[in-house]
Image (cartoon, rainbow, N blue to C red):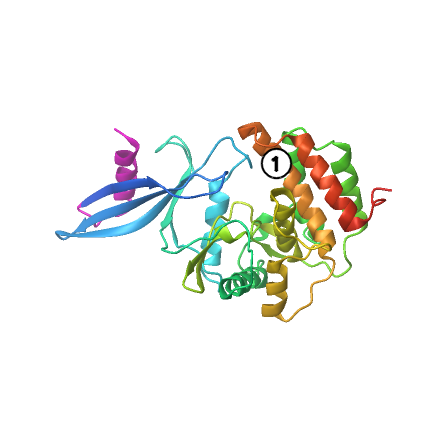
Amino acid sequence: MDWRERLAGYLAARLPAAERVVVANPHAMPAGASNETVGFDLRVTVEGREWSLPMVLRPQREEGVLAPYDVSRQFRVMRALAATEVPVPAVAWLEPTGEVLGTPFFVMVRVRGETLPLFWYGRSARLMAAAGALAKVHAVDWEGAGLGFLGEGELEDPLEAELGPWRARAERLRIGRAPLLVALVEWLRANQPGDARMALLHGDPNPGNYLFAGERVVAVLDWELAGLGDPRSDLGFYAALQTVFGGMGGPHGETLLSEAYEAVTGRRLGDLAYYEALGLYRMAVVMAGWAGRFGAMSTGHTLEVIARRLGVLLGPGWAG
């Protein structure tokens, strides 16, 4: 029995009114370096009539750039967000064991839309729509939505709530004690802005994680890095992406996305350099995972790029 038959049997047990359940047209879907995503048509026959439902299978990887992975966590986040203004695909079933496909997985509805390249290279209506969607993420009442499980330890400190999982990843990849990263953690703790607050974070708000229909965002995707922290952290991570991959970041941590965010929210964003510095810590961890999996960029080279950028953002003597 191949995986399609096993999945069909699993779904048939959850659709008792169905006379027949078929998993058809499986195909790999575009995704980032860390994700595995399989689109398929769920064909369900009820009272002699067949219905075809566009679905997505998200299996859990055991290893990869951002291991350890947890599809149950992603499922819980997306299910909670279904009751908010954040547009997310509807999640249908979670299988937390490996008994069906050999690994945990969840199934969600497939939303039709168009994604964009990694960076914004100009102002547009879609840029404004994406900034508005991100602002909706940050406005979620995360406590009321039951998303407190995303935080680490005490939830009074936005920096520690976010940094904990990333430091654990750094240790797993054996770069947690790199002198640059140790100094950066100390600097971040000593310089956290006084107006830092706790909010829901998407974790990776690059344009490829939005689905557009025309100029409207119809879905925000890829919640595996969701967490809690200051809203500016999402914008800082996007700026850090540009630093490492060659986008067009500003000298103080500003980007086209942060400018659009200010425009749609009507709020001026301060201390963006700090939040890009936090994003650069995360990027060091991401790129260490990339180097281990793809051999793409050496960790040492990435740390050199990050060190130069930190000198621009924070001044040449930032580490004391």
Residue drawn 29% across and 43% down?
11
Q: Specify whether 261 is left or right of 308.
A: left
Q: Position of residue 194 (x, y in %)?
A: 78, 59
Total numbered labels: 1
Q: In the rendered view, would you say 2 is above or below 315?
A: above
Q: Element at badge 1?
A: helix
Q: Nearer the viewer, residue 39 or 72?
A: 39
Say what amino acid the circle numbered 1 marks: Met
Q: Quadrant of the N terminus?
A: top left
State left or right for residue 132 relative to residue 250: left
Question: Going 21% across and 53% down the picture, which residue do you hit?
Answer: 51
Relative image position of residue 316 (x, y in whole percent)? 83, 45
Give the residue number, with chain letter if any, for mark 1. Answer: 287
Q: Is residue 305 above or below residue 274?
A: above
Direction bottom: furthest residue:
266
For the point 78% across and 45% down, which residue is it? Answer: 311
- Residue at the extreme left of the image, as rendered: 48
Question: Which stretch appears magenta?
Answer: 1-19
Res 153 seen here: no
Would you call the spot at circle 1 few (<14 residues within 10 Å), some (14-19), or many (20 or more)? many
Residue 73, x across and y down, in percent: 50, 45
Front-most of 238 and 62? 238
In the rendered image, which quarter contains the C terminus?
Answer: top right
Quick check: 306 left or right of 57? right
Q: Is residue 18 magenta?
A: yes
User: Residue placed at 52% from the left, 64% from the top?
Assistant: 124
Residue 261 appears in the figure? yes
- Percent across and percent down for residue 87 are 45, 60
Magenta run includes residue 187? no
